[in-house]
Image (tube, rainbow, N blue to C red):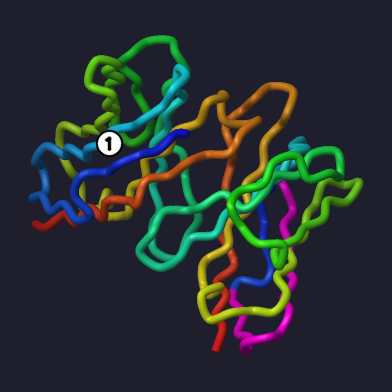
Amino acid sequence: DAGVTQSPTHLIKTRGQQVTLRCSPKSGHDTVSWYQQALGQGPQFIFQYYEEEERQRGNFPDRFSGHQYPNYSSELNVNALLLGDSALYLCASSLKQTGETQYFGPGTRLLVL
Amino acid sequence: AQSVTQLGSHVSVSEGALVLLRCNYSSSVPPYLFWYVQYPNQGLQLLLKYTSAATLVKGINGFEAEFKKSETSFHLTKPSAHMSDAAEYFCAVSDLPGGYNKLIFGAGTRLAVHP
């Protein structure tokens, strides 16, 4: 049973560019949440997708946007990258119906130069 | 608003010694509490969770945590540390069981285990 997968594993961008990160949820899961983990800090909630809609959002600017596809996979897009966007981006999946605990993927490490 | 405070960003213990990682939470509603572990260059793995059943929660790898409402604490313990326990540990709180809602994480505690 495949767990949560994320791609790419590492990414280097320059300021002002745009980036797309991808996540495939654990088999059977329908809800995807995204978190940003800056170096030396705990993860911070960005947003959550369920039924292809953004259901909740944390304190992140509109430069951060997402999408969920009918197969429950999800994308995180960040526009106009800033140096401060350098972080590990974690995707977590869960099954809405059961309220089961979120399972995390290995993350995508983004470096903005 | 909910928040989590983890006391001690770094904890160092000897192999075989007691592990105690401290977590205090703030929540205006009955909280759901979680401990996650993160090994280098990996994502987060759930160690254990408190969801209003027993106050003493047993998790994987010999870890356990006790929910103390009067102290707003959820400290993580392990009787005997192993070298493989060296990792970063995060305490998290949610106002829903965890699948529905966002998790609010503490800043983390890095555990070092020396021979």
Q: Residues within 10 Å of mark 1 (few under 14, many from 20)?
A: many
| Residue type, label 1 | Cys
Give the overall secondary structure of the magenta segment.
strand
SS under mark 1 = strand
Placement of B54 over or under B72, stated as above or below: above
Q: Over which residues does the magenta segment extend? A: A10-25
Whether residue B55 appears in magenta in the rendering, the answer is: no
Placement of A55 over or under B71, stated as above or below: below
Q: Which residue is drawn at 45% across and 17% down?
A: B30
Percent x, y for residue B6? 27, 43
Give whichever of A58, B75 is nearer the camera: A58
Q: Which residue is drawn at 27% across and 51% down?
A: B109
Percent x, y for residue A65? 75, 60
* Outermost top residue: B53
Q: Circle 1 is placed at which residue position?
A: B23
Instruction: Quadrant for the C terminus of chain A, please.
Output: bottom right
